[in-house]
Amino acid sequence: MMDNVIEIKHLNKSFGNHEVLRDVNFSVSKGEVVCLIGSSGSGKSTLLRCINLLETPSGGEIIYNGENILDKKHDVRQYRTHLGMVFQNFNLFNNHNVLKNCVVGQQKVLKRSKAESEQNALKYLEIVGMDKYVNAKPSQLSGGQKQRVAIARALAMNPEVMLFDEPTSALDPEMVGEVLKVMRKLAEEGNTMLIVTHEMEFAKEVSDRIVFMDKGVIVEEGPPSQVLVDPKHNRTREFLKRTLK
Amino acid sequence: MSFEVILSILKENWPSYLNGAYITLLIAIFSTIIGALIGLFIGIMHTIPLRKRSIKSILLKVLNFILSVYVEIFRGTPMIVQAVVVFYGVAAYGFVMDRFIAAVLVVSLNTGAYMAEYVRGGIVSIEKGQYEAAEAIGMSHFQTMIHVILPQVIRNILPATGNQLIMNIKDSAVLSVISVTELFFATQSIISVNYKYAESYLIACVMYLIMTFAASQLLRLLEKKLDGPKDYQFNQNKEVA
């Protein structure tokens, strides 16, 4: 039995009449790097956003440490601190400088002291190579730099799982590399990561498992050597043909 | 109109002019601050996300309705009329308000009604991603507002607040109708003795201009200060790999 950090059972999500996720079953175990792939509108981002409840699932269960967090009595905010989220559009707090972006959550949510928060923030800013820029405001940074700070901000909360929602999709091509490099490093260090991405080469390299989604369902999943090289399903094959061209 | 006349008016009446300007500034500054706070409060109330039907959300809806009525009334009537209605209306019930307090009250309520809309607009215009990022690290709605949203909103509504301050400096002149000894009323009193209309009002005019110009410059300074330095310093404590 694998050590599942997050387990999703029969998850459904609809926006009005539109079903975006249908009976999704899926889990992430400790230290695993999972990439979610699929075409736009396949529901992979929605799945990721459902996991940290930025979208409210219409049905199903999300089990974290043996508890269903969709239970009404469950403390959603407490749960969210265990998940680090990295957005496509970075979403750094515009009113704070780089350091404060990585500190404010630790201080206000985790109630850590200022000194401890800053020390911890610096540690992760160094990992992503942004420790020089502690005094800069988000508006003064490039896209790649912003995303690296956003990764440090998420890491500084010491989450159990890192969620990445198309972290390189809003970046200029020459900046994609620096962000992927940081993510590769995190993967090697044994962080549990769930990544929605269109970067097939990167997915192939870093992931332990690839999950292919189409039209709101998981079509197939398995190690990259199997899903990306010798997929079982026609839909996967067609998707790969289109993207790997 | 001659320069000598102006000088002699100033020589005789400078304490009244200065005192009038002082009262004008006090009313304008207090009212702008109180009005901005009222506006912030209403703006925040209007943008609290409503969860399904609960007693809380019903109460909030009732409160928001009352606040909307207030905004409509104070935006939709002239301040000079509000001043008279408030001051003499209260007096009719046998309670005579301090004129200065009545003035600050009317201008504050007026400012609050306008600021409420600026604040609401300011909150709505903050991108969704800012809320999501704050939520994603576990902040409550309250924490999100305090640490992420409102600082940005306040920065964004600062120019509108500055406008409001300048308008309050000028429009407080209508409070002479309830005999508050602000600059316009002071000037009228001076004229009632010397009958030099043009020269006396010209002095008041220049004093208003000085006050509004100073206010706009100070606000620009404040904006710059809030924006912080244009450049950033590299952190030199750590060596760079």
Image (cartoon, rainbow, N blue to C red):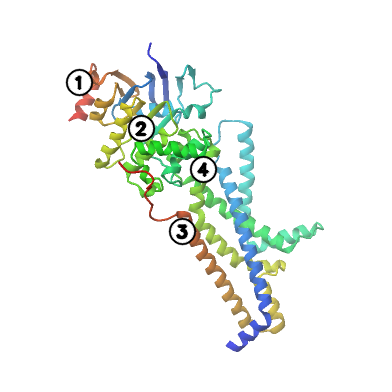
* Residue kind at label 2, given as amino acid type: Asp
C-alpha span from label 1 to label 2? 24 Å
Element on which disc 3 rests: helix
Question: Which residue is identified by label 2?
Answer: A165
Is A41 displayed left or right of B94 in the figure?
left
Nearer the viewer's eye, disc 3 or disc 1?
Answer: 3
Residue A233 coordinates in the image, percent (x, y): 24, 17
C-alpha span from label 4 to label 1? 47 Å
The chain to which mark 4 is attached is B
Q: Height in image: A112 above or below B174?
A: above
Residue B159 coordinates in the image, percent (x, y): 50, 58
* Residue kind at label 3, given as amino acid type: Lys
Q: In which quarter of the image is the C terminus of chain A?
A: top left
- A240 or A68, which lies in front? A68
Question: Which residue is identified by label 4?
Answer: B147
* Residue kind at label 4, given as amino acid type: His
Residue lying furthest top in this view? A1
C-alpha span from label 3 to label 4? 20 Å
User: How many other residues sit within 10 Å of disc 4, few (<14), some (14-19) or many (≥20)?
Assistant: some
Question: Which residue is identified by label 1?
Answer: A229
